[in-house]
């Protein structure tokens, strides 16, 4: 024993030294001053009350009381990861976007997946579209594609978004989601038939976040250096393939784990099994707009690939889980309004409403200076005359914080970066689009499904429609599906015990 003691002492010294390096980091108050006791409040003697002068206690409780921020009004439940996008080529003939200007060009990205309707702690197994929001940190500013895992949307005008979301969210009386409410909304919204056919098929419950595609849904404009405009639609093709769950499989997973998709994403990335997606782009010349039996700016429609072929322009790989969930996933702020030179919004009226809504909600959710948070901050310097506001970390560059001025202004607008001119004429109006064609693509989708997929769709839809007490709403809904495809509507009517003659009568009244 005596002989081993020096070694024992040396070992103990190393351990103590290592521990003191840790211990040398003092626990501090928010002002950096060391804390003496992190367990016992200051009291007036053994049995006396707690003292107000105990700043550490008061500040610790106050910080805890403020840990929650408002969750996203939609898409509250989600998870994100960092990665990289690599351009497959030089696409400058189509767009001047810098991140697509060169083969092999790498751009860092952050991607957040989400569900839409339920709160931030809800199960990831629910039937719901999945958000698929990508932020590119490009050399000309941040570019976001804020898309979903389904290629179309329920509605075509932003005016209807709050009503639609109210009908899908839990009832203000019972606090439960209620098919009576959302089917009443959709019974008045025939353009939702296409999206509902996706949502109630097994595509409505993706197996996880990795095995799903992403879609930009809207048309956007690509503009090249000569100012030539093309309209584009985006698809992210999962290189893991696409896998969905039946309602029964989802129920089994949910019984054990309701964060299965986040766990799957993070564990695969940590293991080095990096998920990847290829970005496909459909390019449409505006002079071809009238060639279709639908309006290409209508977000309830796909551009069928046999009419508008897709080309693959790059690959995104996710390779890093954020160190802190709140800092990255919760504080990330995506917006269809984060655009870069060479990419502009189309006239899609759903998209135009989104251009306002995201920045507005983020100022409310995260504060006026949310774009200065790490996850949202561009990799290039932000130079403008916006200033101050809560938690501003901007540097003031000059006394001349206005434009225009006689003094040499610190920043100047750059020639050649104005928005692309668009010829317009006519009278302002407030009415729906003329080429609505609400049912044809829903029918095409139904017919593209295998028999097993159709059976699942009928079971899922009739399961929810059975809960609707108002028979007129049931008939109206089924009439929409009947107009999409007679077999589709007939099978639903049978599953719900509705007379087909009544369904047909309503279907005939639909445009
Ligand atoms: C999130 C509004 C349509 C995809 C949000 C948020 C709002 C919103 C307010 C919360 C943003 C935040 O707190 O950071 C709207 C409005 C729409 C609309 C007004 C229609 C007028 C769509 C469509 C898509 C979509 C068509 C898909 C193409 C998303 C995604 C998120 C989101 C992915 C979550 C982004 C994230 O992960 O932080 N939307 N939305 N939304 N929306 Fe929309």
Image: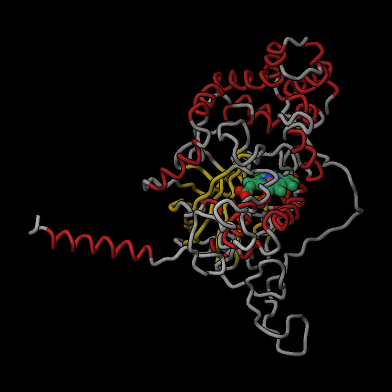
| Image spot of residue 16 (x, y percent) | 28, 62
Location of residue 504 in the rendering, given as x and y in whole percent from the top left corner? 80, 16
Q: Eyeballing the image, is 79 above or below 464?
A: below
The image shows a total of numbered marks equal to 0
Q: Is residue 305 visible?
A: no
Q: Is residue 121 above or below residue 234?
A: above
Nearest the eye: 196 or 490: 196
Quarter of the image where one finds residue 301: top right
Identity of the residue drawn at 80% across and 27% down? 184
Instruction: Name the side, left or right, on which 86 lies relative to 192.
Output: left
Examine the rendering and report whether any part of residue 23 can be seen: yes
Q: Nearer the viewer, residue 102 or 82?
A: 82
Give the quarter of the figure containing the C terminus: top right
Image-based side of 87 in relation to 382, left or right: left
Q: Residue lying furthest right in this view?
A: 427
Q: Position of residue 151 (x, y in %)?
A: 63, 40
Give the position of the N terminus as an image quadrant: bottom left
Q: Position of residue 109 (x, y in %)?
A: 52, 57
Q: Residue furthest bottom?
A: 407
Colouring style: secondary structure
Looking at the picture, tell me which residue is in the foreground, 7 or 134: 7
Residue visible at 70% across and 66% down? Answer: 390
Query: Position of 442 compared to 185: left or right?
Result: left
* Quarter residue 293 falls in: top right
**Which residue is more in the foreground, 485 or 338?**
338
Q: Quadrant of residue 435?
A: top right
């Amino acid at each position: 024993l005596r002989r081993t003691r020096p070694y024992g002492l040396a070992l103990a010294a190393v351990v103590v030294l290592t521990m003191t390096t840790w211990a040398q980091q003092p626990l501090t108050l928010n002002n950096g001053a060391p804390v003496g006791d992190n367990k016992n409040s200051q009291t007036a003697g053994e049995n006396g009350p707690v003292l107000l002068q105990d700043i550490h206690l008061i500040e610790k409780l106050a910080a805890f009381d403020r840990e929650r921020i408002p969750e996203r009004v939609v898409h509250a439940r989600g998870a994100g990861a960092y990665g990289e996008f690599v351009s497959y080529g030089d696409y400058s003939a189509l767009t001047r976007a810098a991140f697509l200007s060169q083969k092999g060009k790498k751009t860092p990205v952050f991607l957040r997946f989400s569900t839409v309707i339920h709160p931030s702690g809800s199960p990831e197994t629910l039937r719901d579209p999945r958000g698929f929001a990508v932020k590119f940190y490009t050399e000309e500013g941040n570019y976001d594609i804020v898309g979903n895992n389904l290629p179309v949307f329920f509605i075509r005008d932003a005016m209807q978004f709050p009503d639609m979301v109210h009908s899908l969210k839990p009832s203000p009386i019972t606090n439960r989601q209620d098919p009576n409410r959302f089917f009443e909304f959709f019974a008045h919204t025939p353009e939702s038939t296409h999206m509902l056919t996706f949502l109630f098929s097994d595509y409505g419950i993706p197996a996880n976040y990795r095995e799903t595609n992403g879609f930009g849904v809207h048309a956007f404009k690509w503009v090249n250096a000569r100012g030539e405009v093309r309209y584009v639609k985006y698809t992210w093709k999962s290189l893991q393939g696409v896998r969905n769950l039946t309602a029964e499989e989802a129920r089994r997973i949910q019984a054990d784990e309701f964060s299965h998709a986040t766990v799957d994403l993070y564990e695969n990335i940590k293991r080095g099994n990096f998920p990847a997606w290829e970005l496909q782009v459909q390019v449409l010349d505006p002079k071809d707009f009238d060639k279709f039996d639908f309006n290409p700016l209508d977000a309830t429609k796909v551009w069928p690939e046999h009419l508008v072929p897709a080309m693959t322009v790059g690959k995104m790989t996710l390779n890093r889980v954020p160190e802190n969930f709140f800092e990255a996933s919760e504080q990330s702020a995506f917006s269809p309004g984060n655009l870069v030179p060479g990419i502009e919004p189309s006239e899609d009226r759903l998209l135009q409403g989104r251009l306002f809504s995201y920045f507005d909600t983020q100022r409310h959710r995260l504060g006026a200076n949310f774009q200065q948070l790490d996850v949202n901050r561009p990799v290039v310097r932000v130079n403008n005359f916006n200033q101050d506001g809560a938690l501003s970390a901007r540097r003031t560059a000059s006394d001349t914080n206005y434009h225009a001025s006689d003094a040499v202004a610190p920043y100047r607008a750059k020639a050649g970066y104005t928005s692309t001119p668009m010829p317009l004429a006519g009278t302002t109006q407030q009415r729906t689009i003329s080429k609505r064609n609400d049912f044809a693509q829903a029918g095409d989708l139904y017919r593209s499904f295998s028999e097993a997929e159709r059976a699942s769709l009928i079971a899922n839809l009739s399961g929810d429609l059975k809960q609707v007490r108002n028979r007129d709403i049931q008939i109206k809904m089924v009439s929409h599906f009947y107009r999409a495809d007679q077999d589709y509507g007939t099978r639903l009517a049978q599953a719900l015990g509705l007379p087909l003659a009544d369904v047909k009568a309503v279907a005939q009244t639909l445009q």
